[in-house]
Each structure stands twice: as C-alpha cells, then as structure tokens.
Amino acid sequence: MPGSPLRTDDLRGQNDVLKSAKSRLENLSNHLPPPLKPCVVSGVVEQSVCSAQHSNGGVLPEDVVIVSALRTPITKAKRGGLRNVPAHALLTTVLQATLKNSGVPAQDISDVVVGTALGDSQRAAQCRIAMFLAGFPESVPGRTCNRMCSSGLQAVADVAASIKAGYYDIGLACGVESMSSDPFITDSPVEPEKLVESSSAQSCLLPMGLTSENVADTYGISRKAQDELALTSHTRAARAMRSGRFAAEIVPVATKEKNPSNGEDLEFGMCIVLKTMLLQAPSLA
C-alpha cells in the first residue's frame, strides 16, 4: 500500500499504547464477577439470587444493581437538533422517563446526583428545578458533582458507594451538559504570576484541542490512524442506531425550531446529551 513507512519510534509508541490499553482492560475485567449461573428452584430455572451462588459470583445482599439506564443521544453543538433545548429541560425529560420506565416512586429515591462539568454558576439550581418539574417532592435531595469529563461516572460512583455504605437503598445518578449553551470561558480569577511556579498549574488552562495534540505527539499517534479510528467508530454507531440497538435506552426530547432571521418559533419537532442511572440495593426477599 502507498504511504510513508512508519519509524521505529512510531511503532514503539503505538505498541506502548496497545500494551497500556490491554493492561487497563485486564484490570477492569478483574473487577467483574463471573456470569450469573441459572439457579434451579423446584424444577424452575431462575436467573435470580440463589444462596448457593454467593460463594461463586452470585448477587449478594450488599451488591448494588442498575435497574434503569436511559439517555438522549448526542447532537451537534450550535447546529444540532437540541441546540435550542436548555440543560434543565434535557434533564427533566430523562428524569420523567426514568420514573415512568422504572416504576420506582419519586419519593422512594433517597438522593439525586448529577455530574456536570460545564455550565454557569447556577447549574446546581437548574438541576434542582429539573427535579421539581419531573415530579420529585421537596423531600428528595439533589446535588451536582464535577470531575470534568468523568463527572457522570463520578455521579454513578457516588450513588453506588452511598448504597454500599448503607446510607440509603435507592439513588439516581445523572449527567447533563449542553455544549450549545454552556460558556467556553472561565469566570474564575487566576493569578498569572503564580502560574509560572508550576508547569502542572499552567497545563490546567490548556484547551482540549492542544491537549489532544500533545497526547498524539507523545504517543506517536498519526492523523491517519485517528481518522481511521473515527471512521470505524462512527460507522459502528450509525449501524447500531439503524438496527435499533439503542432504542430501549433513548428518550425523545421535544424541541422548538427557531427562524434564524428573527428568532421566532417555527414549529415543534421531535429530536432524539444525557444519561441517568437508577441504582438500588437488590431485594433478596
């Protein structure tokens, strides 16, 4: 095949990346329990709890399980079908669907944790508004958490840890962002004279674009390899969408289209950046 040959440094860098990825996958797989084996009770095969399985990977009383996971698909920022939908409306839609699909009463949920990295200083209030609009009573508390790109995952970890610790039995972990409406500038003061004291502190202000260029340079990942991976990923995602693999987890969102010339509403549409996970301790009754 035509093209410039790879240098030894390039091959070594790519091999290091593959070894690192393989190591991470092996570490993750070690945290997963063995597949749940059917339990025969009075001649009936059940996939539920069997006391005999407690010693070989079955569900235990202290386990935490996901009973509902819903989301809306991601659309393009500024140009996509959700560009006119504020973050609280996105969250409201999926919270309502979670309550309906899971059958869990809102008042039985002990905490709602929303992971969010961007947004203005009122994001916590917006999430609280979304809870009330979705039908949650004032007795159910809610909060946000921020671990940048891992904020949604941190929300899941926080709820799971609280259930594991016995603080409550049912919690709702969410994530919400709106790149169309979120600000792209920092409103927190930074002392420039202090930044020169730490290169790590300086790197905190690097935009994601430069960060990705640095990663590609460090590990020898070529533009061609990135483009091939992106094409493969998007092709698989499009095929999965068309085949209905995500149909059970996608929640449609009602949107308003606006006239670009005057900003007036044109029509209501249905558009298919969010995820919620309802977690609870298993019932062993």
Image: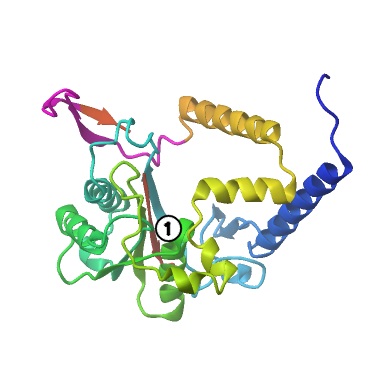
Residue 284 location, quadrant = bottom left
Q: Where is residue 205 in the image (x, y as percent from the top left)?
A: 48, 59
What residue is shown with label 1? 152
Task: Work out which quarter of the rendered image holds the C terminus and state it.
Answer: bottom left
**For residue 140, side relative to residue 169 (left or right):** left
Residue 272 location, quadrant = top left
Task: Work out which quarter of the rendered image holds the N terminus and state it.
Answer: top right
> Can I make out residue 184 in this image?
yes
> Can I make out residue 284 in this image?
no
Q: What stretch is highlighted in magenta?
A: 246-268
- Residue 88 painted magenta: no
Residue 216 higher or lower than 32, as above or below: above
Q: Residue at x 66, y 30 (%)?
A: 228
Q: Position of residue 276 (x, y in %)?
A: 36, 53
| Number of residues whose C-alpha sits closer than 10 Å to that of mark 1, classed few (under 14), some (14–19) or many (20 or more) | many
Q: Which residue is drawn at 40% across and 38% down?
A: 74
Q: Residue at x 79, y 48 (%)?
A: 13
Residue 179 higher or lower than 162, as above or below: above
